[in-house]
Image (tube, helix red, strand yellow):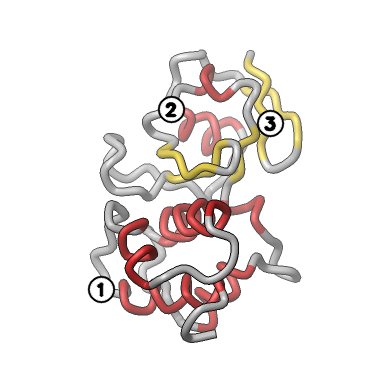
Amino acid sequence: MLQLRVNGRASAVEAEADTPLVYALRNDLRLNGPKLGCGRGQCGACTVLVDGRATRSCQMRAGDAVGHEITTLEGLGTPERPHPLQAAFIAEQAAQCGYCTNGMIMQAAGLLAEHRGPVSEAAVRDALDHNLCRCGTQPRIVRAVMRAAGGQGA
């Protein structure tokens, strides 16, 4: 039994210490934001924030997450009060199939936490460079992140 702090709450999970964090989040805590894509940390679909930093949850062991604050997509906002990134993704219609959306939003949340205020489009593109989207919504995703950051498109 592991004690994790997820979305501001203490949570007990049955996972073994060497279980990938994404499995503990999805299977034990029933959080569907992080998606299991490649399982190799290359696609970004499983991205969560660990102590405010974007982290591939398929590459982090659940045991290594003990003592850290984990934030998933579900912890950013609510349907009634969405996080600015969630609201911007809706406004820009930045999701198509939705599989990459969790990773894009969580990677962008990490970027915006590091850079308070407006960021350049180049910085957004660089931050999202290793998050894969096969639907072709990258221009809308970039506009959504810029909107949330208070940059162009806001």
Contact check, label 1 and label 3, Cβ < 8 Å = no
Q: Residues within 10 Å of mark 1 (few under 14, many from 20)?
A: few
Q: Amino acid at mark 2?
A: Met
**Earlier-in-chain disc, 1 versus 3:** 3
Secondary structure of the residue carrying tag 1 is: loop
Secondary structure of the residue carrying tag 3 is: strand
Q: Nearer the viewer, residue 14 or 84?
A: 84
Please tell me the numbered disc located at residue 92.
Answer: none
Please tell me the numbered disc located at residue 5.
Answer: 3
The x, y position of residue 123, in whole percent, is 37, 63
As measured in the structure, the alpha-carbon distance from the residue carrying label 1 to the one carrying label 2 is 28 Å
Q: Quadrant of the C terminus?
A: bottom right
Q: Nearer the viewer, residue 26 or 137?
A: 137
Q: Is residue 129 above or below residue 38?
A: below
As measured in the structure, the alpha-carbon distance from the residue carrying label 1 to the one carrying label 3 is 35 Å
Is residue 34 found left or right of 80 in the rendered image?
Answer: left
Q: Amino acid at mark 1?
A: Gly
The residue pinned by badge 1 equals 136
* Residue at 68% from the left image edge and 43% from the top image edge: 7
Q: Amino acid at mark 3?
A: Arg
**Earlier-in-chain disc, 1 versus 2:** 2
* Residue at 44% from the left image edge and 15% from the top image edge: 18
The residue pinned by badge 2 equals 60
